[in-house]
Image (cartoon, rainbow, N blue to C red):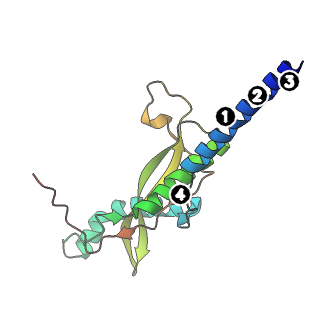
């Protein structure tokens, strides 16, 4: 009887140790600062709609600028730690929601800066229910997790001069 009790106790200790180890492992993977530069779904929609409107009206904008394309943002810089925190936030929130295959969709947007619409990008969380041979349209936006913007726009634009 004593051996059965010790064996049972040993098995329980092993199981609890395993569960504790797994929980510690999970916490270490998801250790991040909560993102502060989130945008609402309404703001994200406004940015995307402004971008579409801006490019629908591009011929008029060029004509009003004496045939010259006005200088605009061509690059947006994001702090790596802030981006990693956002990616960890999306991963954790997706797990909490039970969403499979989380991802990020990058949208072009425009927002008003000094009275002019300037290009920007924002990140929108996605998920996919099926893994087998996914089509891009299979990735659905997850509107239950906020989008992220607030990078630093390159004005004047930073030239990309990659080496040959």
Whether residue 163 sits left or right of residue 49 in the image: it is left
Q: Which residue is label 1 attached to?
A: 18
**Quadrant hosting residue 150:** bottom left
The CA span between labels 2 and 4 is: 47 Å
Vertical order, 65 against 42 (above or below): below
Q: Earlier in the sequence, mark 1 or mark 3?
A: 3
Whether residue 156 sits left or right of residue 79 in the image: it is left
Q: Is residue 121 visible?
A: no
Q: Which residue is label 2 attached to?
A: 10
Q: 78 or 70: which is nearer to us?
A: 78
Circle 2 sits in a helix, a strand or a loop, which is it? Answer: helix
Q: Earlier in the sequence, mark 3 or mark 2?
A: 3
Q: Is residue 103 visible?
A: yes
Vertical order, 9 against 119 (above or below): above
Q: Earlier in the sequence, mark 4 or mark 1?
A: 1
Q: Residues within 10 Å of mark 1 (few under 14, many from 20)?
A: few
**Quadrant hosting residue 117:** bottom left
Q: Nearer the viewer, mark 4 or mark 1?
A: 1
The percent position of residue 162, horizontal first and vertical second, equals 16, 56
Q: Nearer the viewer, mark 2 or mark 4?
A: 2
Q: Which residue is label 4 attached to?
A: 147
Q: Nearer the viewer, mark 1 or mark 2?
A: 2
Q: Which residue is label 3 attached to?
A: 5
Q: Earlier in the sequence, mark 1 or mark 2?
A: 2
Q: 46 or 99: which is nearer to us?
A: 99
Q: Residues within 10 Å of mark 2 (few under 14, many from 20)?
A: few
């Amino acid at each position: 009887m004593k051996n059965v009790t010790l064996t049972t106790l040993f098995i329980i200790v092993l199981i609890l140790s395993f569960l504790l180890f797994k929980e510690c492992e999970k916490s270490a993977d998801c250790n991040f600062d909560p993102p502060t530069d989130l945008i609402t779904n309404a703001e994200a929609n406004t940015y995307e709609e402004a971008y579409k409107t801006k490019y629908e009206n591009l011929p008029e904008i060029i004509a009003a600028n004496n045939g010259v394309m006005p200088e605009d943002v061509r690059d947006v810089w994001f702090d790596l730690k802030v981006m990693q925190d956002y990616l960890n936030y999306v991963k954790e929130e997706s797990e909490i929601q039970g969403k499979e295959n989380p991802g990020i969709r990058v949208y072009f947007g425009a927002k008003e800066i000094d009275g002019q619409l300037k290009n920007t990008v924002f990140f929108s969380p996605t998920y996919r229910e099926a893994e087998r041979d996914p089509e891009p349209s299979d990735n659905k936006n997850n509107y239950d997790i906020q989008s992220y913007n607030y990078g630093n726009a390159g004005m004047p634009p930073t030239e990309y001069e990659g080496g040959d």
